[in-house]
Amino acid sequence: MRYEWHLNGGRHELQLVPVSGTGGTPYLFGHGAQRAPVEIQDFHMSSTPVTQALWSHVMGSNPAARPDVRCPAENVSWEQITGPNGFIERINAGEIRSAMGVPPGLRFRLPSETEWEYAARGGPRWTDDFRFSGSNDVDAVAWYGLKWSGGALKWRFLKTGLGRLISTVRRRETRTHDVATKAPNQLGLYDMSGNVWEWCDDTCTDEVSAEPPPADGTPYRGAGDNRRLRGGCHTNWDIHCTVWWRYGIVQDAHDGCIGFRVALA
């Protein structure tokens, strides 16, 4: 499913990728001893994070901290996406649904955290068990800051000092990049690891909350003002870009590291 439009003389595209559900054989959400079985229904996921071009096309403005229409939309809060007159409401009410031939029973929304992780792991190919979305090689699939190497990193910090370490991060040119310029995962999804953090629909109670997600793939709706972020970003260590890393922040937060992608279900 595709939708094309033009902005400032350039052609842009929203592509939706089908993600087959678990079909009665749950996938294991999470990492290590904390993994839990989750059932997922069929859905579609946008092949890239929502771009600044798409945000501008739907919303009529571009709030990005680093404007570049082919980069991910960023500096947008969970509330700006899901609230009244927000992105989700507008894209569901606008021309995109009809132009793509979206059936009446389906709507655009943020993915649940379990849907997001299932898609990042390759959907039905989740047993490939890649560390990052589509590969064990972070450089193949992600824009990120530095590699986390445990004891080696600690020794390097002690030898060189914080200043040298910060300089190294800066030399990595930590900024957002055009979407789909790294390799996709097994489903054809780009930038699920790195580039920008991605909002999910779920509530979370702290940064790396231990609460289990719903086993049916729906969003966690517990009490709390924080919302779930997944995927890591261009300034983070590679470990934050793994398919299992969980993070959360208040729902009105927005900066140049936070974006999102849409699901259709």
Image (cartoon, grey):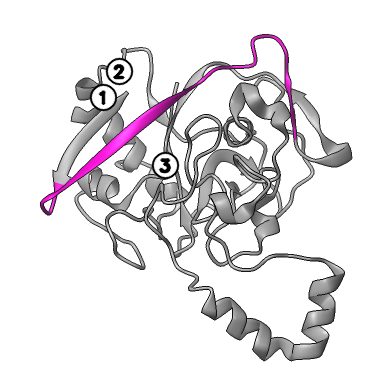
| Residue that badge 2 annotates | 102
Residue assigned mark 1: 97
What is the C-alpha distance between the residues marked 3 and 1? 18 Å
Q: Mark 3 sits on what residue?
A: 48
Amino acid under disc 2: Val
State the residue at coordinates (41%, 51%).
Answer: 181
Residue 164, placed above or below residue 253: below
Q: Is residue 80 magenta?
A: no
Would you place residue 146 above or below residue 154 in this image? above
Work out whether mark 3 precedes mark 1 in sequence or the reverse, and give the earlier one. Answer: 3
Image position of 3 with respect to 246: above or below: above
Q: Amino acid at mark 1?
A: Arg
Q: Which quadrant of the rendered structure holds the N terminus? A: top left
Secondary structure at badge 1 equals helix
Above or below, comparing residue 88 to residue 143 in the picture: above
Task: Look at 34% across and 62% down and name the residue there.
Answer: 64
Q: Which segment is the magenta one?
A: 7-29
Q: Residue 129's x, y, as percent? A: 73, 35
Q: Is residue 198 left or right of residue 239?
A: left
Dividing the picture into quadrants, the one containing residue 90 is top left
Q: Secondary structure at mark 2?
A: loop
Distance in Å between CA atoms under marks 2 and 1:
5 Å
68 and 222: which is toward the camera:
68
Circle 2/circle 1 CB separation < 8 Å: yes
Q: Nearer the viewer, residue 22 or 167?
A: 167
Rendered location of residue 143, percent (x, y): 52, 59
Location of residue 48 (image quadrant): top left
